[in-house]
Image (cartoon, coloured by chain):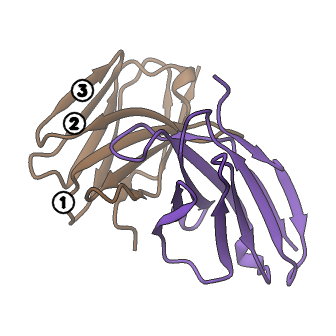
Amino acid sequence: TQLLEQSPQFLSIQEGENLTVYCNSSSVFSSLQWYRQEPGEGPVLLVTVVTGGEVKKLKRLTFQFGDARKDSSLHITAAQPGDTGLYLCAGIKAAGNKLTFGGGTRVLVKP
Amino acid sequence: KAGVTQTPRYLIKTRGQQVTLSCSPISGHRSVSWYQQTPGQGLQFLFEYFSETQRNKGNFPGRFSGRQFSNSRSEMNVSTLELGDSALYLCASRATGSGETQYFGPGTRLLVL
């Protein structure tokens, strides 16, 4: 069982549609990160959220950290084919800095 | 600055063999972490090295080991390979390891036959 559960595992949408990816846990995290990984590459950090209830925007991507710091969501508005990839959430529990990753959500945006 | 580099990029081994993977962090970064990524288990933390000392360790058997050199380059070794060790092994570096962005390399894809 993953400490961080991501849903859905796979998402296929048409260009221009919106999508939301969820990252849930029963544990509290001091911060949570979202990464995107493309084939043949390592994950690339998109955002770090630290404060419960925090909302961060990165162009068409909106990230939210739950009030209790146990869950997070990533919303993409008007998705484009370039948004295709594996989206990973990762939580940090304490100053130890060890990252715990969710299972990932594979997003496919068709033109 | 050059990014994190990992060598080799691809590797095929047979059961029972051992393998050594190498990671060169971004210049100036002193923390190197290793992860194993598989379709079934996702991305799992192996260990972190900082200034040549192991600082954190994940839940992997003792067959998985690592080390870091004085120039911050790191190697990980897997002995007595098993089929289940087939995975993408990723290394990530950061400056000091405390609340800073971690930069991942492209990974080494290991296939155990």
Where residue A31 appears, x then y in whole percent? 25, 47
Where residue B80 appears, x then y in whole percent? 79, 84
Q: Which residue is mark 3?
A: A56
Amino acid on which disc 3 is placed: Lys
Amino acid on which disc 2 is placed: Gln
| Image-based side of A30 in relation to B38, left or right | left
Q: What chain is colored brown?
A: A
Q: Colour of chain B?
A: purple
**Is the N terminus of chain A in the top left, top right, bottom left or bottom right quadrant?**
bottom left
The total of numbered circles placed on residues is 3
- Determine the secondary structure under disc 1: loop
Q: Which residue is mark 1?
A: A28
Where residue A67 appears, x then y in whole percent? 9, 46
Q: Earlier in the sequence, mark 1 or mark 2?
A: 1
Q: Which residue is mark 2?
A: A64
**Residue B80 in the image: above or below residue A81:** below
Q: Pointer 1 indicates a residue of which chain? A: A
- Determine the secondary structure under disc 3: strand
* Residues indicated by labels 1 and 3 sit on the same polypeptide chain: yes
Q: Is residue B45 visible?
A: no
| Image-based side of A75 in relation to A104, left or right | left
Q: Pointer 3 indicates a residue of which chain? A: A
Q: Residue furthest front?
A: B70
| Image-based side of B10 in relation to A76, left or right | right
Q: Residue at x 59, y 58 (%)?
A: B34
Spatial separation of the CA atoms under disc 2 and disc 3: 6 Å
- Determine the secondary structure under disc 2: strand
Pointer 2: residues within 10 angstroms few (<14), some, or many (20+)?
many
Pointer 3: residues within 10 angstroms few (<14), some, or many (20+)?
some
